[in-house]
Image (tube, helix red, strand yellow):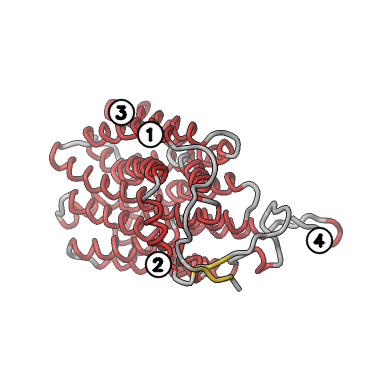
Amino acid sequence: MGRGQGGARRVHYAWVVVAVTFMTILMTAGMRAAPGVLIVPLQNAFGWSRATISGAVGANILVLGMMGPFAAAIMDRFGIRRAMVVSLLLMALGMGGSALVTRPWELILLWGGVTGSGMGLCFMVLGPQVAARWFAAKRGLVIGILTAATATGQMVLLPVFVWLQTVGGWQTVVLVAGAIACVLAVPVLLFMREWPEDVGARPYGQIGPVAPRAVSAHPIRRSLAVAREAMRSRDFWLIGGGYFVCGASTSGLIGTHLIPACVDEGIDPLVGAGLLAAMGALSIVGATGSGWLTDRFDSRVLLGWYFGLRGLSLLALPYVLHYALIGLTGFAVFYGLDWIATAPPTVRLTAQRFGEENVGMYFGWISSLHQLGGAGVAWSAGLLRGTTGDYQASFMISGLMCLGASIAVTFIRSGGVVPRRETAPAVAAE
């Protein structure tokens, strides 16, 4: 930070970038959570099975995840601001256009292809990219804050979406969501900047010379080359496997199916949305606190605890689901604190094992595994619900997966960066 005339301390522009990024991720997270509100209304409106609608949700999560690693390369080549604007416009088109659907394939196309592509440009890799470009210090805290934006979107927008659905129907929800995405593109255009040098600043907390930056001349080729390198690394699979389970147990299971599970128990959907909103509020505390802990403790130990506690809570969920006031409230508190706490230590481990300069690319592929897990469980939990009549099997399986992940992450190696070959030609940034 610097001082203006009269000695007043000025806010570093990095925090303005964080604010704009926070709002974009918040909106993306709100749209991602919206299908949880819409599954039952769509089922009632069209007579489609829950598995069919869950398939569209799964397609959304899958496309989102597959975009992640390419999004990092596209941001490196064409700029973060352009990617954010295109992302918001695609979300507006896909979500708003879904008000006109009459067939399942149309829902899959708009939710999965269009909206999923828009989300994928920003949702998983935007935070790490901003933190790496704008911060030399407090990166763990910044990752925690930006990760908390996903929870804030859920907390702020889910109750609004439930209310809109109640008073205006499901079409009102998707139209309003699309309009919000359009409006948000304006502050992104006005205030987002690519690099600290663009505003005559240095990265926050930078001491010493700033390392020269390079931008890939072939972003897609570079992203695929990074994938080939990553697949040779045991640590990549351990880190990515843990994040696969994270996506399966959060966005895939609880984020998509908690409200329908509450409806199955005769609980008002507004109560289910309130529980998810409460989890969102608590996730802000959990993610920010996890960022603080990540700057101070071994990330492997943190992940082991996070996954272990999450697994136990999911194993208990089928038994507390019948006690809405006490049981579900306790679950919401416990699960909310743990919801996105895994992100800061996962980003830190990625940087430690593959290098700070490669964190965007590698974390993009790790994030794709996160979304693959979410997509699989979003669909399979709906299928199991149709087969068994409830969600108990899905809760139990996800809980056991989390317990397995808590053990697996302890085998990630500590130490320096994994040696790697140059994966693609780079050109110096102008």
Mark 4 and mark 1: span between their CA atoms? 51 Å
In this view, which residue lies farthest toward the right? 6
On the image, numbered disc 2 is attached to which residue? 221
Dot 1: few (<14), some (14–19), or many (≥20) neighbours within 10 Å? some
Query: Which residue has dot 3 on it?
Result: 315
Q: Considering only order in the chain, which callout, 1 or 4, is on the residue closer to the N terminus? A: 4
N-terminal of the two: label 3 or label 2?
Answer: 2
Q: Of the numbered discs in the image, which one, if any, rests on residue 408?
A: 1
Q: Nearer the viewer, residue 106 or 126?
A: 126
Task: Measuring from the top left, give residue 328's x and y in whole percent.
Answer: 35, 31
Determine which residue is flagged by label 4: 4
Q: Give the CA distance from mark 2 to mark 1.
A: 31 Å
Mark before the other along the chain sequence, 2 or 1: 2
Mark whose residue sits in front, 3 or 2: 2
In the displayed structure image, the side of residue 101 where residue 427 appears, left or right: right
Q: Is residue 19 left or right of residue 400?
A: right
* Tag 4–tag 3 contact (CB < 8 Å): no
Q: Secondary structure at mark 2?
A: helix
Residue 33 image point, x, y percent: 36, 51
Q: Nearer the viewer, residue 90 or 156?
A: 90
